[in-house]
Every structure is written in structure tokens, then in C-alpha cells.
Amino acid sequence: MSVSLAFLTVTVSIIMAVVLIQRCRLHPFIALFLTSLFLGLCAGMAPAHVIAAFETGAGQVLGQIASVIALGAMLGKMLEASGGADQIALTVVRLSGRRHMGWAMMLIGLLVGISVFFTVGFVILVPLAMSVARQTRLPMLRVALPMTAALSVVQGLVPPHPGAMFAQAAYHADVGRLIVLGIVLSIPIAIISGPLYADFIVPRLAPNPHDMVLAAPPPASRQSMPSFGITLLTILAPVVLMLAGSVARLACAPGSLPGTVLRFVGDPNVGLVLSVLLSFYTLGARQGMSRQDMLRLSSDSLGPLASLFLMIGAGGGFGQELMDSNLSTTITGAAIGMHIPVLLLAWLIAAALRLAVGSATVAMGTTAGVVGPIVLQSHGVSPELMVLATGAGAVMFGPLNDSGFWQVKEALGLSVPQTIATWSVIETLIGVSGLVLCAALSWAGLG
């Protein structure tokens, strides 16, 4: 197949997915499944091979990351139910003082966001933000926007969140290096899009007649919460274990006992299951939860993941169709010949898909399926920076078809124009600053 026809086939397939999701209101899984079949058939694959390729791609991707996402959801649920998230938030706020409250809320968002999905973290922390704003007499948005920005940054850049883990598998990135780079980049990105932008935009917004600070009741108090140190230890346990596994690959001799043990416990699946077991004790049993309570919480955390797993699996199937049809090989050769920076290519595709379909996870997964084969054949590009650049593009714009747009609007009592001026601009700042920092690290050879 010619280069132009290959590009046309892939472009039409992506447009088809967007139309099916946006116009026809099909579930993203169905849209991506139909698009994958269309892509394979247009590329000349036999019908039986088209089905087999989709099943193979979906199975491989879910086999690599489904358990990681499920275990991360369990850990997040324990953090929420035990009051551990509240403890972290209250401790940081108590230590920061009124003058630095925006920076404190940013730090809270970064810490809590490591182990919980954006939606869960936002629901947990909004009542706290309301209470803090009421007690300190600060504008609600001056408190809430830095927290919201930090939650979004971590969701897009740092494992074990779904988009980052999907791209990590597609680009064959080292998870330990990815965590380090993700955290390092998350801090300046959160500062730019959080407290700095909040200080700029809040005074320029018209007064909100539905001010949530005055209307919201104080958050319900808890009888007991785990200590700050215990909660922080539990949240950071999977990160520390995965980092230890990466260090062992570099510092320990192959076959040595310490290296073997550290690489084993540093595997994302093993590290997370150990951390979940730790949370059952530190955030569960120590807080008076019964084994039945912890079983119920674990089961409850898995229900909302069904749709996410289907979307991720469909993205993997789409990527396998590209490889089995040889479209990826054709596009790879063309992209290398045109000298398009691969970081920029991934960012642009992810940003375009984010604007089109709304879901950052769909945007990141589909982009990784398209660009992954190019990365595997390119030289001198860091797989870890590719994950981060894809994640930065996938959170761009904060469009109206993004569920987070409406969640932020309703929770913070904003009008649509105010939500665009806050949430949409914050997401754009995250995307642009993420690309700039990734490009700078790549240019300096630090990726």
C-alpha cells in the first residue's frame, strides 16, 4: 500500500471513530471495535484475520495493565473510605497557613492524585476546599483550582493511572523511570496551571451568584482517621516498590538474590498487590474495618472499571490492526523520512483526539496504538518522554465533550464561560507546558 493511501486509511478510521462517538452516540468500545474492523478490511486483511488481530491486541493490552488498574482502584477506595485522603488534606492545610493556601491545595492534589482517579479525588477534595475557603475567607476558586489542576496533571502523567500505563506498555517504557520523570515534570506543570494561573484568573472573573462557599454545608466529620505518616506511607508504597525494581535493573548484577527480589516486588502488579494488602491493615483493620467491610470496598471499586477496560482493550485491538495490516510500517517509514519529531507527532495526535472525543483515556490509548510502532523503530527517542508527551496532549483543551468539564462546572458553581476560562485553560496549560518540558528534556538528553 502506498504512503498516501495508508495515511488516508488511518485518517478516515480515526474520523470514523470520532463520528461514531460524537454524532452517533455509540459507546467508545463499540466505536473503536467497528473502526478496527473497518481499518483491517480496508487494508486488505482477511475477515478472520481482522477479528483475530483485534482479539490479540485487546488481550495483550489488558493482560499487561488490567490488574494494575484494578489494584490501583482498590487502593484508592481504601484511601477514600478510611479518611486517609482527608487526613492528608487537613494536615497540609494546617501546616501551610492562609498565605500559601493555593500551594498547599496543589500539594494535596498531587499527593491524593497519585493513588486515585481524577473523578474520585475531585469528589473527595471539593468539600475540603469549600471548608478551607470558608474558614480562611479566601475565594473558593483560589483554593479549588490549584487542587483541580494538580489532580489532572497526575492523572495524565504518572502511573498507575490508566492512560499512563497503557502508553507505558505500548512504548515499552521503564515504569520506574516513568514515575520519576512524571513526578519531576508534574511539579512545575502543576505550579504553572495551578496556583500561578489561579492568582491570575480569579480576580478577573465576574462574581459568581452561586458561590459554593456560602451555600455548601461543612463536610461531615469523621470519628477517626489514620495518621498522616501511615497514610503517606501507604500511598507511596507502590511508587517506592516500582522505583526499587527499576534501580535493581541498573545497580544489581543479573541473577543476584537482591536484584531478583527487588525486580520481583518492583513489578507493577506485585508492588500494587503488596500495597493493597498493606492498606487493608493500615487503612482498614487499624481503623476498625472488618474483613467483610474491606471485601465490600474492594468489590465496589471494581464496578466502575468495566467501561474503562473495554475502551482500553479496544484501543489495543486498534493498534494491533495497524501492525498486522502493515499500515504502521508504512506510516513509520514515512514519518521518519519527513523528519517529524516523534514527540510532537504523538502530542498532536493525542490533542486532536482529545478535542474530538473528550476522553483523555481514549485519546491516549488510541495515540499510543498509532505511534507505538514508530517509537519501537526510532532511535534516540526516550519511551518515557513519549508517554509523558502523549499524556500532555491527551489532557489538552478540556473541551465541552469532556465529562470533567461538567463535573468541575457543577461542583464549583461556574457558568460555561467561567468553566472555559478556568478548567479549559488549565488543561491547555498542562498540555502545552508538558510538551515544552518533554521537548527540553529530550533536547538535553535527560529523558
Image: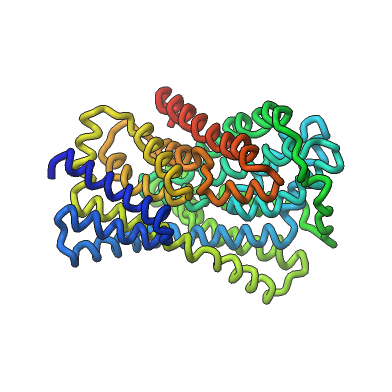
Q: How is the image coloured?
A: rainbow
Q: Quadrant of residue 72?
A: bottom right
Q: List x then y, in percent, for residue 58.
A: 34, 61
State the count of labels.
0
Residue at figure coordinates x 38%, y 50% from the top left: 18
Residue at figure coordinates x 23%, y 39% from the top left: 332
Q: Is residue 185 visible?
A: no
Q: Is residue 262 above or below residue 152?
A: below
Q: Quadrant of residue 190?
A: top right
Quarter placement of the N terminus:
top left
Q: Nearer the viewer, residue 40 or 275?
A: 40
Q: Quadrant of residue 251?
A: top left
Q: Is residue 137 above or below residue 409?
A: above
Quarter placement of the C terminus:
top left
Question: Residue most toward the top?
Answer: 444
Q: List x then y, in percent, for residue 439.
A: 43, 27
Q: List x then y, in percent, for residue 183.
A: 56, 38
Residue at figure coordinates x 52%, y 51% from the top left: 161
Q: Nearer the viewer, residue 395 or 380?
A: 395
Q: List x then y, in percent, for residue 40.
A: 22, 56
Left or right of 196 on screen, residue 33: left
Q: Is residue 201 visible?
A: yes
